[in-house]
Image: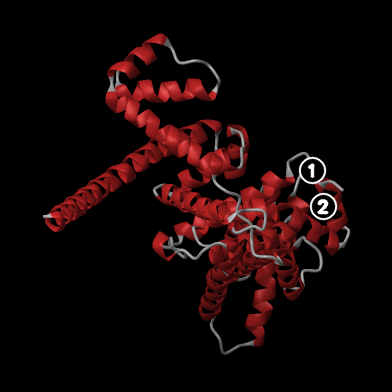
Amino acid sequence: MECKATLWHMRDRFDIGAPAGESDMQHLAACPECRNRLNALLEAESLLHIAPDESPEPGFADRVMSRLALQVVAAPAPVQTKRTVAVALAVVSAAVVAVGCIVACSTAVLALSPGRALIIGLPGAAASLANLMVVMDAIAQSVVAAVHALPAELLAAVAYTLVLCCSLAALSMILVLVRSGKASRAALP
Amino acid sequence: MDDNSLVARTLAGDNEAFASLVQTHQNRVFGLAYRMLGRREDAEDAAQETFLRAYRQLTTFRTERSFSTWLLSICAHHCVDLLRRRKIDWLPLEEAPEAPALAAPDRSPEETVLARERSAQVLGLLKALPPKYRVVTVLYYMHDLSISEIAKATHSSGGAVKTQLFRARDMLAAEVQRTKSAQEPRQGEASERSALVAGEKRLGVMANGM
């Protein structure tokens, strides 16, 4: 029988209050290494059990309450509030990205094939999106008409830059959200 | 008044109720922090931080749980985090300041000396364990938490806690053996020296008698 396995098997038996088996005792009687190891463990355990209680310096509760007052914690629920704000910011960012994408797509459509009519016949959401893009085309067209000097390609480039900026903003907000989520999970016991 | 009533009163805005909770549980929380960090100043900071976190997260406390175990859980995470980030190093034992708390008025000077010795021995043993093993060891042996309670407190499984305890025991036994074997040569040298001194004295007495 392997020494260590026997030793720890015996410890488990002691923990549950069962007496050591005959084979364990025989091994222990014959193996000084296991005997020394078990004695060392029992000594360590008894030291841990009889260790004196430790207490903080007098006035501990007052010091805690003073720190609490300094932090001006009005109600014990700031973790939830932070989370809600982060979620709201992420949702707003996602919406900004979506609008940016639609503007960019419609501007690109305008730049490449101006003057398209409303698209009819596409199914469900695709039709709605296509029609929205065409409406956005019209808006972009009027903007283009207002700024005669600027070519449609430049406008498209500006729109793509806008989308890129919005995406970066959204990404950073999502990172903030993930980090705040991790922090609140770590803080929770 | 029990813990749950005090928690409810604190949530209703009564900070005196929270002060009562601090007073009730300060020794257990401080004791865990001290065993984990090995220095009273660090333990004081960690224990204070534990109560501040508990206050901020009080709405997340479920009353079917033990408030004491919940606090120990917060404290254990905070201490393991501090040790992992290496914000805190163990104080070498020879530099450890004497703990005034151990010199309680109901203890005789001999008992105080003995308590300090034991406390130093325990810190020496725990120092041999990595933070994760140390926390399960302290909660199991010194706070009498069950395996399932430790698993809840450390956010791990019962099997993982048993494995950690198993390895911690192995390390503790090895540390006791190592300490003993380190002391034996010194004791041997001391006894040799005293035998030599005794022999020299005896020779001196014989020489004087001549």
Nearer-the-camera pick, A94 or B13: B13
Q: Label 1 lies in what chain?
A: B
- Residue A91 % position (x, y): 69, 61
Q: Quadrant of residue A35?
A: top left
- Residue A21 % position (x, y): 43, 12
Q: Quadrant of residue A60?
A: bottom right
Residue at label 1?
Answer: B63
Q: Quadrant of residue B86?
A: bottom left
Q: Label 2 lies in what chain?
A: B
Mark linked to residue B168: none
Q: What secondary structure is found at the residue carrying circle 2?
A: helix
Q: What secondary structure is found at the residue carrying circle 1?
A: loop
Q: Are marks 2 and 1 on the same chain?
A: yes
Taking B114 as reference, is A74 above or below it?
below
Q: Residue at x 37, y 41 (%)?
A: B176
Nearer-the-camera pick, A94 or A38: A38
| Quadrant housing the C terminus of chain B | bottom left
The answer to which of marks 2 and 1 sits earlier in the sequence is 2
**Is residue B64 something that shows in the picture?**
yes
Structural crowding at the residue carrying mark 1, measured as other residues with C-alpha within 10 Å and reported as few (<14), some (14–19) or many (≥20) = few
- Residue B77 % position (x, y): 57, 52
Nearer-the-camera pick, B25 or B5: B25
- Please identify the residue farthest to the front as the structure is shown: B210
Q: Residue at x 63, y 65 (%)?
A: A102
Residue at label 2?
Answer: B7
Taking A181 as reference, is A169 above or below it?
below
Asked if marks 2 and 1 touch (Cβ < 8 Å), the reply is: yes
Q: Residue at x 30, y 22 (%)?
A: A3
- Residue B114 % position (x, y): 51, 50
**Is residue A174 something that shows in the picture?**
no
Kindly identify the amino acid type of the residue bearing the numbered disc 2. Val
